[in-house]
Image (cartoon, grey):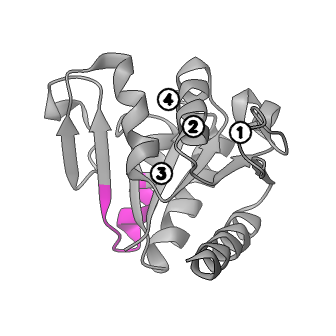
Amino acid sequence: MIVIGIIGDSEASEEEYKFAYILGAELAKRGFVIISGGRTGVMEAVSKGAKSAGGLTLAILPSADKSEANPYVDIAIPTGLGWARNSLVPLASDIVIAIGGKAGTLSEIAYAWMYGKPIIAIVGFGGWSEKLAGKKIDDRRPDFIYPARTVEEVLELIEKILSNLKKSK
């Protein structure tokens, strides 16, 4: 079971929401499990899309209250950790996808980098995903943050990353 972490804007534009919804549906169709922060914006859209395609959705919540999860989350894990929970979504993910994002997303990208997780950053919605797409955060890793503009590009990158991971084992 491959777990795909989705991080990004909690206040998504209409275009961002639609992108995340379609991405969630396409990931679920391929059997991937979705994990996110479980709240609004990109997190809600990807969960809603995944549920529309019969997928499984997990949420790592910052509060101690399960009811903060959006209605499309199957399993809500309340942490009571506040911002410190931002380390957990990348840690639990096999691949992390960033869509837009502000400071919280930046911290999750940094954690994903430190944990050695492949990161795909969406270009076209601004935020930290666009600023970091195609870049390296530091020289501790030989790879870079993969840029993608479309859902199709994301899916192709996931297949490439998974193929490379299988070869390296």
Left or right: residue 69 versus residue 103 is: left
For label 4, the SS is: loop
Of the two numbered discs 3 and 2 in the rendering, the one whose residue sits closer to the viewer: 2
Left/right placement of residue 116 relative to residue 25 reads: right
Viewport quadrant of the C terminus? bottom right
Q: Contact, CB < 8 Å: mark 4 with mark 2? A: no
- Residue 140 — which label? 1
Of mark 4 and mark 2, the one earlier in the sequence is: 4
- Boundaries of the magenta span: 47-57
Question: What's the amino acid at mark 3?
Answer: Gly
Q: Residue at x 41, y 73 (%)?
A: 53
Q: Residue at x 31, y 18 (%)?
A: 82
Q: Residues within 10 Å of mark 1 (few under 14, many from 20)?
A: few
> Residue beneath label 2, please?
114
* Mark-to-mark CA distance, 4 and 3: 15 Å
Looking at the picture, which amino acid does disc 2 mark? Met
Q: Which residue is mark 3?
A: 5
